[in-house]
Image (tube, helix red, strand yellow):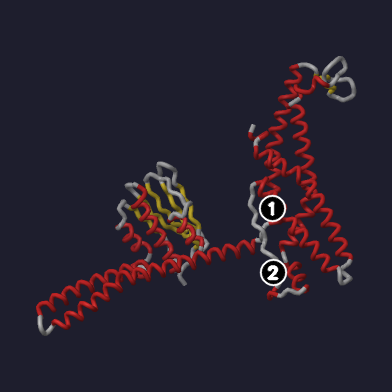
Amino acid sequence: MRLAVGPRTLREGAHLLVNFPIASVLFLFAVVGLMVSGGLLVLVVGLPLLCLVLVAVRGVGFLERARARALLRIDVPDPRPLRPRGGRRDATAWIGAVLRSGECWRATVYALVHFPWAVFTFGTVLTLWSAGLGLATMPLWAWTLGGNDGPGINVDGQGGGWIWDSPPEYALGLVVGCLLLLLAGGVIRGLAHVDRMLVAGLLGPSAEQSRIEELETNRSVVVDTTSADLQRIERDLHDGAQARLVALAMSLGLAKEKLDEDPRTAARMVDEAHGEVKLALQELRDLARGIRPAILTDRGLGPSLSAVASRCTVPVTMEVDLPQRPAEAIEGIVYFTVSELLQNVSKHSGADAALVDIWRADEWLMVQVADNGRGGARTEGGTGLAGLAGRLGAVDGRLMLSSPQGGPTTVTAALPWRGRS
């Protein structure tokens, strides 16, 4: 029933039927506009008229994307506004921006290609739905028509031949009608998928624009992450090592004053200051380890992650199979990714065993952290995994999560392989 007359089938079928009137008007406008402006290109007015036609067709793309968003449930981003080079606002710069706009030309191709497709989809959906609904509801209205000898339907339409005028024949029509509606549902799904491809491919942003927007987003993530890290380092220095060093300076100043009059007290104060120096050094080492651990720089991922695993409250099996060390930036991201995931295992999983597996697959560096805990992890809602996915995306990496309720949880990260030069 859902395939035959469900909400999705009705939405997509309505979209395919509405295609015809909209595509007809758009096709007629585009063809007439291109022909007239093309014929006038020898005159001054031809080029501006061509640009107006392209912009108008591009504007209809906003209607088509909204229609696809409402009926096909596909969200195609709007293209960027037309921007003349150099910020100029004269007519020549505007004409150049329109002629260089790939969105305008692709929208025009959509107007020309979509019309024959709309005619085909309109005829197909209308035929299947009309025949299917007519046969499926035949027991309700067939008695109103007169056959040769009474109520019934002349199947051949010539006043003779096979006449449907009995309950079994009405039941046959009902079955055939339901089968046609079922067939129509499957056909509509397929036709709607082609419409989605046309809208996304011709009315959506170009691959270049999508890549630019992705890089801008990644750059924002990197900037925000870097700013947060700098604020954390500043806070740790101010509240930790800096405060200890200030207290140490004051203690040494007091010890210097008491050195002559009370050497024993001065010696005790120097001894306390020595302890403060050790604590300050330890805090600075911890801070440096949070930036980039020395063991990672000196010995690589295997030993450094083994040290991280030893601090995890869950027994961790470590497997690192790399032919060579990756680039420092990638290596650092892998280190902190595994560190954060193992912290999540310790705090939230309730597991009694975990596995860290790192290997190279073609041009990808694969990282997998799995545990046998309670599961239920999510990347939505501003969790640490969402931030981790953003950091990986900044270097064209991906984060995949499998964590059903009851476990197990498997987090897989894929980063582009970049070896050391």
Q: Residue at x 67, y 61 (%)?
A: 79
Q: Nearer the viewer, residue 295 or 179?
A: 179
Residue at figure coordinates x 38%, y 44% from the top left: 374
Quadrant occupied by the N terminus: top right
User: Which numbered tag is attached to residue 65?
Assistant: 1
Quarter of the figure with residue 300: bottom left
- Please, what secondary structure does the residue beneath circle 2 have? loop
Kindly identify the amino acid type of the residue bearing the numbered disc 1.
Arg
The vertical placement of 262 against 10, above or below, is below
Query: Can residue 299 be seen here?
Result: no
Name the mark on residue 83: 2
In the rendered image, the vertical position of residue 289 relative to residue 114, given as above or below: below
Cβ atoms at labels 1 and 2 below 8 Å apart: no
Q: Position of residue 345 (x, y in %)?
A: 36, 52
To which quarter of the image does residue 322 belong? bottom left
Residue 238, quarter of the rendered image: bottom left
Q: Is residue 371 visible?
A: yes
> Looking at the image, is 15 positioned above or below residue 157?
below
Q: Residue furthest top?
A: 149
- Residue at point 71%, 36% (across, down): 184
Residue at the spot 90% in from the left edge and 24% down from the top edge? 158
Percent of width and height locating residue 206:
66, 61
Q: Is residue 99 left or right of residue 311?
A: right
